[in-house]
């Protein structure tokens, strides 16, 4: 199957081919016809399966066919990184098409706020927004969504995890009742199904590879003391200097510490976390995407908000808090049918959490030998493998 089989408009096909898109992924094959036929949809698909294009392409095609001067589509996302990523994808898809879009998110200056206001008032075709920033505009009274045709909730589970349920409800109160609703989520817990029941009308359902890392990811782990993690990390980076590497840690303070130590050791590294100004975040992401920077350290803010196909290794400096977060972290590598490696450092306290990850994915992840002197003590090993740590 090719994208031409969807009978997309020529301008969209040209944009796709110029970006190197050739064949649709399974989520795209299933979702695009449903969306083109104007049905609501609830789709569960893991990160890296191409779900962003699965909803953007049919919506862009509709906008090309039915030109308008008002906001046609609203995409709500949990983080500014994801908003920027989606906006960039739209710019590529619509390079040859007269479709306008703007990402709206917090952390910008007054000039950015005014640009967002104008886009909302004068009608950019597609608005991608984080909930808080959009509500700040809605509260001013100048936003009119009465001609809105499509609503997309992307990473819906993440938004609810971040406490945006009330914000989403408030945003919905500003939207017309008659619209197409598309809900995309990496997981499908009860709270997502409850949200879907409240928003969607007779939705079609799609479920793609729930809670499984992509097949192209080689997964491995080290059982290592905290004091040995940095030495082990430097050793891995030294052996993989030519690769693009993404390191996840649990807190922004730890991310800052890792960045400082690696920079002092001579590695080409930067960090991204919530304390960074937006301009600096954008600069770091540009450098990382272009290859100018090959090591990036981040909190989970990036686990769903970065779309780079060439990341060679993802390193979990800490075991993720939730088993599902592991899926999203390691999903940053082996994207678009490529291959990659995911490495996790496990201390004594984290072995029970890691066992839950293995239970979730249905496989035991291979443990690699640790350099002498940095192993977790065997007594701690035994204790934490079989008993939760409180």
Image: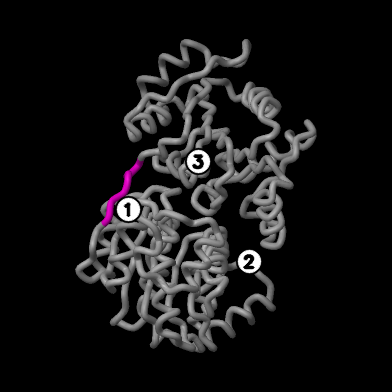
Residue 175 lies in the magenta stretch:
no
Locate the C terminus by quadrant: top left
* Among numbered discs 2 and 3, the one appearing first in the sequence: 2
Task: Give the alpha-carbon distance from disc 2 to disc 3, as whole Å.
Answer: 34 Å
Q: Can the viewer see residue 72 in this picture?
A: yes
Residue 212, given in percent of the width and then of the height, sits at 36, 39
Alpha carbon distance from label 3 to label 1: 21 Å
Task: Name the front one of labels 3 and 1.
Answer: 3
Q: Residue at x 36, y 22 (%)?
A: 387
Q: Secondary structure at mark 2?
A: loop
Where disc 1 sits, the SS reads strand
Crowding at label 3, few (<14), some or many (≥20) Cα neighbours within 10 Å? Answer: some
- Relative to 186, does residue 102 appear above or below in the rendering? below
**How packed is label 2: few (under 14 Cα within 10 Å), some, or many (20 or more)?**
some
Location of mark 2 (residue): 107
Range of magenta residues: 206-211
Q: Which residue is identified by label 1?
A: 44
**Is 312 drawn above or below residue 174 in the view shown?**
above
Alpha carbon distance from label 1 to label 2? 30 Å
Can you tell which quarter of the image residue 228 is in?
A: top right
Residue depicted at x 53% and y 32%: 341
How far from the left and from the top, in percent, is residue 249? Answer: 58, 39
Mark identifier at residue 338: 3
């Amino acid at each position: 199957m090719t994208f031409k089989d969807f009978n997309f408009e020529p301008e969209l096909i040209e944009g796709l081919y110029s970006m190197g898109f050739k064949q649709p992924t399974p989520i795209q094959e299933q979702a695009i016809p449903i969306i083109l036929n104007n049905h609501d949809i609830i789709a569960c698909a893991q990160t890296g399966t191409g779900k962003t294009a699965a909803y953007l392409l049919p919506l862009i095609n509709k906008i090309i066919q039915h030109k308008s001067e008002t906001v046609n589509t609203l995409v709500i996302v949990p983080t500014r990184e994801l908003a920027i990523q989606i906006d960039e994808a739209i710019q590529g898809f619509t390079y040859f098409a007269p479709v306008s879009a703007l990402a709206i998110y917090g952390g910008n200056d007054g000039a950015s706020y005014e640009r967002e206001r104008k886009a909302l008032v004068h009608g950019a075709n597609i608005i991608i927004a984080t909930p808080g920033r959009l509500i700040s505009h809605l509260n001013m009274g100048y936003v009119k969504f009465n001609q809105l045709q499509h609503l997309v909730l992307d990473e819906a589970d993440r938004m609810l995890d971040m406490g945006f349920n009330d914000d989403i409800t408030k945003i919905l109160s500003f939207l017309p009742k008659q619209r197409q609703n598309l809900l995309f989520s990496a997981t499908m817990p009860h709270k997502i199904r409850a949200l879907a029941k409240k928003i969607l009308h007779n939705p079609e359902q799609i479920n793609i590879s729930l809670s499984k890392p992509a097949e192209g990811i080689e997964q491995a782990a080290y059982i290592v003391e905290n004091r040995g993690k940095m030495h082990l990390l430097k050793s891995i980076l030294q052996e993989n200097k030519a690769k693009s590497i993404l390191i996840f840690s649990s807190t922004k303070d730890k991310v800052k510490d890792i960045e400082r130590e690696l920079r002092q050791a001579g590695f080409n590294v930067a960090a991204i976390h919530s304390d960074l100004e937006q301009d600096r975040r954008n600069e770091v992401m540009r450098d990382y995407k272009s290859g100018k920077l090959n090591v990036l350290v981040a909190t989970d803010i990036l686990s769903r908000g970065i779309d780079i196909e060439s990341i060679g290794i993802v390193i979990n400096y800490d075991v993720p808090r939730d088993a599902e977060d592991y899926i999203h972290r390691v999903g940053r590598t082996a994207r678009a049918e490529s291959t990659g490696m995911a490495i996790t450092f496990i201390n004594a306290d984290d072995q029970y959490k890691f066992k839950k990850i293995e239970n979730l994915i249905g496989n035991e992840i291979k443990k690699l030998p640790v350099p002498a002197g940095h192993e977790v003590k065997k007594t701690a090993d035994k204790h934490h493998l079989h008993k939760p740590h409180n």
